[in-house]
Amino acid sequence: MSGHAAVVHGEEVPKERVDALLAAVPPRDRETRPESLARAERQRRRWATQVVVADELARRACAERGLKPPEEAPPPRLLAVDGTDVADLGSIVAAALAHSPAARVLLAHLEGRQHVPEEAVRDYYDRNQDRFLSPEALRRGVDPFGGGAPGDFLPYERVRDGIERELRKAAGRRAFVDWLDRARAGVQYAHGHEHPGDPSHPDHEHRH
């Protein structure tokens, strides 16, 4: 039996790394029938393989960019994955960022390289006036989309830097997801470790 879960740029990723992650992540499915439980576990292993592969790819990307990658594999631990991150990024990417210090270093690097034009910041402010009501306007129940006076909104100059940070963060996340999609295109997976949504295996599902 093969001892690897995937092959990344010609180097094997040991199954033990997947097993360690699985031990740190409790099953989210509450299946009781044997066949359903077996299917859920197969999908969980495939999901965990994607997270481990993302970690391996991030380590390599950090090294290539002269960033300081972690010296050792992160110790197995119960992952705390933010629900908002799952909704925004999908569970694989969100778990990879929670699991992999290298992925977080790379994300920070990509985020720092994003340029947010002033026009985009101003446009966000103008299109999301409901987010910038003053505390007093909120207490009065002012409708931000009709009837609000200029004084009911926080001044643009006061919130501009926060908007820019938020837009840069979003752009950095998109850049990370784009990078990961490209980086794992050439990864080869051992049987039983394919992507959960890979239609080549019979019980695939496109759930991230």
Image: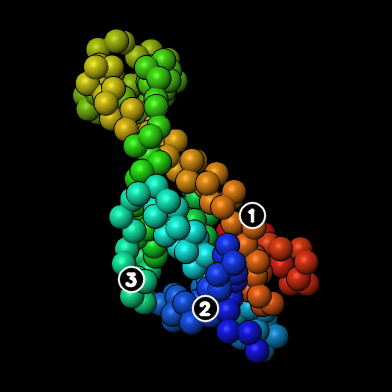
Q: CA distance from mark 2 to mark 1?
A: 19 Å
Position of residue 122 measured from the top left corner of the image (x, y, whole percent): 38, 17
Q: Is residue 13 above or below residue 184?
A: below
Q: Earlier in the sequence, mark 1 or mark 3?
A: 3
Look at the numbered disc 1 and give the secondary structure of its residue: helix
Mark 2 highlights which residue?
Answer: 14
User: Could you tell whether 131 is left or right of 1 in the image?
Assistant: left
Residue at horizontal 30 percent and vertical 55 percent from the top: 68
User: Callout 3 environment at 10 Å: few (<14), some (14 to 19), or many (20+)?
Assistant: few
Which of the 4 image quadrants contains residue 153?
Answer: top left
Q: How many marks?
A: 3
Residue at horizontal 36 percent and vertical 65 percent from the top: 80
Residue at horizontal 63 percent and vertical 84 percent from the top: 2
Quadrant where the image shows the C terminus: bottom right
Q: Amino acid at mark 3?
A: Glu
Position of residue 18 measured from the top left corner of the image (x, y, whole percent): 50, 76
Q: Earlier in the sequence, mark 2 or mark 1?
A: 2
Position of residue 188 measured from the top left corner of the image (x, y, whole percent): 65, 66
Q: CA distance from mark 2 to mark 3?
A: 14 Å
Which of the 4 image quadrants contains residue 75?
Answer: bottom left
User: Could you tell whether 12 is left or right of 97 in the image?
Assistant: right
Mark 3 highlights which residue?
Answer: 72
User: Could you tell whether 13 is left or right of 83 in the image?
Assistant: right
Position of residue 123 measured from the top left corner of the image (x, y, whole percent): 43, 18
Q: Is residue 69 above or below residue 179?
A: below
Mark 1 highlights which residue?
Answer: 185
